[in-house]
Image: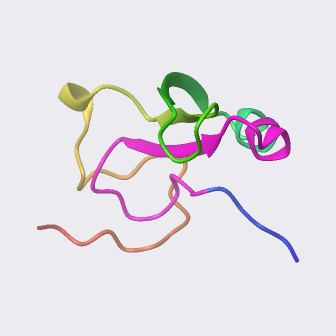
């Protein structure tokens, strides 16, 4: 079984991808850090008492610079619909 992290190569509605990883899940944390996600926060005792959910973010840049209709070098040839 293989698993891929959420990709920023899909048609975008946001320059950011956020996800949570349980503090006791070291393999997932390592996986997402290697994929370029940055730890930005912690939710203590959110699901399991004594453990945290770690909030990660991967970004293409700030909202002010983001254009959902623009293509980037990361796009894989998919047509991005204009809203």
Give the side of residue 1 with respect to residue 47, left or right. right
Residue 20: x and y in percent read 54, 44
Residue 59: x and y in percent read 46, 34
Looking at this rendering, what residue extends furthest in the front direction? Answer: 49
Give the side of residue 33 with respect to residue 40, left or right. right
Residue 43 colored in magenta in the image = no
34 vs 11: above or below:
above
33 vs 5: above or below:
above
Q: Quadrant of residue 26?
A: top right
Residue 12 colored in magenta in the image = yes
72 vs 10: above or below:
above
| Boundaries of the magenta span | 6-30
Image quarter of the N terminus: bottom right
Q: Residue at x 77, y 44 (%)?
A: 25
Q: Residue at x 24, y 52 (%)?
A: 68
Residue 48: x and y in percent read 59, 44
Residue 4: x and y in percent read 72, 62
């Amino acid at each position: 079984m293989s698993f891929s992290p959420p990709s920023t190569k899909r048609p975008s509605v946001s320059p950011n991808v956020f996800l949570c990883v349980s503090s006791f899940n070291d393999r997932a944390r390592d996986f997402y850090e290697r994929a370029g996600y940055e730890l930005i926060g912690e939710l203590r005792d959110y699901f399991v008492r004594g453990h945290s959910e770690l909030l990660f973010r991967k970004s293409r840049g700030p909202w002010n610079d983001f254009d959902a209709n623009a293509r980037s070098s990361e796009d894989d040839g998919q047509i991005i619909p204009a809203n």
